């Protein structure tokens, strides 16, 4: 009887090992979620097309309702996922901590909507770029070189985005805005909360900081000239 | 159990597939891949083109920001597209050999 139990145990171990090996093989045969997620992030820069759309009545209506409709659709999908109606597996590229929490793509969308609806272009564009490009770049730097390099590298990348967007401003305004904006973006990325995603923070924190800065400067009598970066296109007909 | 400390490396891992045959699950992602790669490049090109037509040909400097943004969007996307396409190729190769 004892021999039989030992044999049974040995067979069980063999089967477990074989199952583990098969599982490893299957896992190696899978689509790379890491780069997929990075590319999705960078794809977000396409939302800047919003500013290129012609300034015509019916297009303005589309510009207002379509982003809102897409966002509401994403909210419904997310509710269904969290309730278990749609399996999380179908949301490819989700991280472990997003399994029982709202997905970061929804936070990203919310931040973009807030920026394009309520903030001027000069603030919205660099903040969206920070969320789309600086965030995955900072993620890669963290992944490859460690946390310490993230702050410096992220700050420089974000600063470039702010400088490009404010290149028509006076030199001191250009530097002040770039430093405040880049600091806000790095702060938004580095400070992590379980309930609030960094995709939201990296866009909204610099935007709010810049809005406060502009409010203070205007109140102390400093005039800052605003100039659009992207101009609406003309209707082809 | 989902860990609440998201600084934890394990929580940054991606959700594992629980099903064995995952081709159907990533089918939408595979179909979306060309869009993810080409749309940002088209937007980048449109910004550069807009600068060329409305700014460069008319000798003004109003849309210089569009030119730089066009380059930032294009280069930023290409940086991530290359490893993504490589991983896609690897996936297709593994799919054939499986």
Image (cartoon, coloured by chain):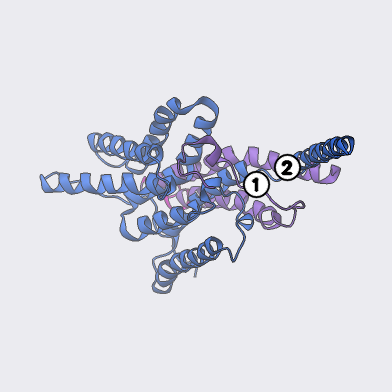
Chain colours: A blue, B purple
Give the alpha-carbon distance from disc 1 to disc 2, as whole Å: 8 Å
- Magenta stretch: residue B93 in it? no
Q: Using the image as rendered, state which of residue A2 and residue A59 is in the foreground.
A: A2
Numbered label attached to residue B16? 1
Q: Quadrant of residue A158?
A: top left
Q: Position of residue B95 (x, y in %)?
A: 80, 46
Say above or below: A149 vs A159: above
Dot 2 surroundings within 10 Å: few (below 14), some, or many (20 or more)?
some
Q: Position of residue B19 (x, y in %)?
A: 73, 53
Numbered label attached to residue A29? none
Number of numbered discs present?
A: 2
Dot 1 surroundings within 10 Å: few (below 14), some, or many (20 or more)?
some
- Is residue A216 shown left or right of residue B69? left
- Magenta stretch: residue B58 in it? yes
Q: Using the image as rendered, state which of residue A61 and residue B11 is in the foreground.
A: B11
Q: Position of residue B33 (x, y in %)?
A: 66, 51
Does the image show residue A234? yes
Q: Check disc 2 and report the residue beneath it.
A: A27
The numbered mark 2 sits on a residue in which chain? Answer: A
What span is colored magenta in the figure? B52-61
Residue shown at 56% from the left, 62% from the top: A81
Say above or below: A182 vs A56: above
Q: Secondary structure at mark 2?
A: helix
């Amino acid at each position: 009887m004892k021999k039989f139990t030992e044999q049974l145990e040995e067979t069980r171990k063999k089967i477990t090992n074989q199952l583990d090996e098969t599982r490893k093989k299957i896992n190696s045969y899978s689509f790379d979620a890491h780069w997929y997620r990075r590319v999705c992030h960078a794809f977000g820069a396409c939302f800047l097309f919003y500013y290129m759309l012609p300034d015509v009545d019916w297009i303005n209506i589309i510009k207002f309702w379509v982003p809102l409709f897409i966002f509401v659709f994403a909210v419904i999908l997310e509710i269904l996922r969290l309730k278990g109606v749609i399996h999380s597996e179908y949301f490819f590229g989700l991280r472990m901590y997003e399994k029982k929490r709202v997905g970061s793509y929804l936070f990203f969308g919310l931040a973009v909507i807030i920026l394009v609806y309520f903030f001027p272009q000069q603030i919205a564009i660099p903040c969206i770029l920070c969320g789309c490009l600086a965030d995955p770049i900072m993620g890669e730097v963290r992944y490859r070189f460690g946390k310490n390099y993230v702050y410096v590298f992220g700050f420089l990348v974000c600063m470039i985005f702010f400088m490009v967007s404010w290149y028509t401003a006076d030199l001191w305004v250009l530097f002040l805005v770039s430093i405040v904006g880049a600091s806000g973006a790095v702060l938004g990325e580095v400070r992590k909360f379980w309930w609030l995603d960094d995709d939201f923070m990296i866009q909204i924190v610099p935007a709010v900081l810049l809005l406060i800065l502009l409010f203070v400067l205007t109140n102390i009598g400093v005039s800052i000239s605003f100039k659009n970066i992207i101009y609406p296109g003309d209707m082809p007909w | 159990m989902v860990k609440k400390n998201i600084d934890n490396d394990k929580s940054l891992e991606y959700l594992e597939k629980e099903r064995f045959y995952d081709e159907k699950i990533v089918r939408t992602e595979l179909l979306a891949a060309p869009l993810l790669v080409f749309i940002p490049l088209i937007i980048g090109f449109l910004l550069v083109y807009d600068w060329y037509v409305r700014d460069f040909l008319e000798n003004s400097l109003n849309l210089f920001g569009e030119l730089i943004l066009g380059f930032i969007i294009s280069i930023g996307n290409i940086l991530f597209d290359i490893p993504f396409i490589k991983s896609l190729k690897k996936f297709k190769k593994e799919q054939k050999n499986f």
